[in-house]
Image: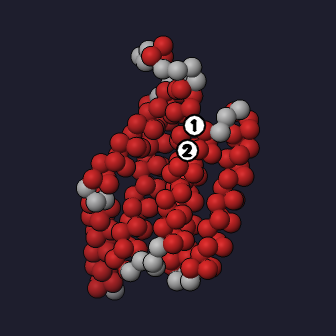
Amino acid sequence: MVDRSLLPAGAVTRFAWAIPIEFAVVHASGFLAMPWVARWDARRRAIYVPALAGLYTLPLAIIAFAVHGWWPLTIFWGLMLNRMLVVVFGDLPDDNAFTAWAMAWAGTTTLYVLSIIAGVFVARTDVARALIIGFVYFTMVGLSELTGWAWVHRWMTRAREREAKQARSR
């Protein structure tokens, strides 16, 4: 199936670990919206974001200790640092910018769950499952980013239309 001799020792296992670390990234990203929703000032955001980062860093540090490598923390911080900096130092987003961010977050969350389901039903081994999940998830997120999350916008538009139709029929 995969010629592992082409990869450095342990590389497939590290690729497999990207999946639970991505869960931490998606999960933490949802909490990063709190300062925007609450319209917090920069000082309060500068306190909240490092505290949130610490809460996620602790379990990932335990994982890093258990696997004898820093790469779980490196992956998490590599993916989260830019998001954290935007929340701390950026201006509060207007409604359109926040909606775009929320749509992307909802899309990544949906794709993560669907990728896990696909991996569970398709793969026969844990490593193959993780690789399938990773391939499906990251490919679909990339394609969604390229299309501006068009499928999420269509999904939300249809949901609003159904709600409006139900409200009119009452």
x then y, percent, for residue 123: 47, 28
Q: Nearer the viewer, residue 166 or 158?
A: 158
Q: Amino acid at mark 2?
A: Ile
Instruction: Report crowding for label 1: few under 14, some 14 to 19, many 20 or more residues within 10 A (C-alpha).
Output: some
Q: Which mark is residue 17?
A: 1
- Where residue 7 appears, as percent x and y from the top left, is 48, 20
* For discs 2 and 1, the disc positioned in front in the rendered view: 2
Q: Earlier in the sequence, mark 2 or mark 1?
A: 1
Residues at marks 2 and 1, CA–CA distance in whole angstroms: 10 Å
Residue drawn at (40%, 43%), measured in percent from left and top?
A: 138
Q: Residue at position x 34%, y 77% from top?
A: 96
Viewer-proximal residue among 69 and 125:
69
How far from the left and from the top, in percent, is residue 91?
45, 78
Viewer-closest of 87 and 103: 87
The answer, for residue 136, to whether it is visible in the render is yes
Can I make out residue 121 in this image?
A: no
Residue on which the image places disc 2: 75
55 to 170, vertically: above or below: above
Neighbours of disc 2 within 10 Å: few (<14), some (14-19), many (20+): some
69 over 90 or under it: above or below: above
Which of the pair 74/135 is nearer the observer? 74
* 30 on left or right of 156: right
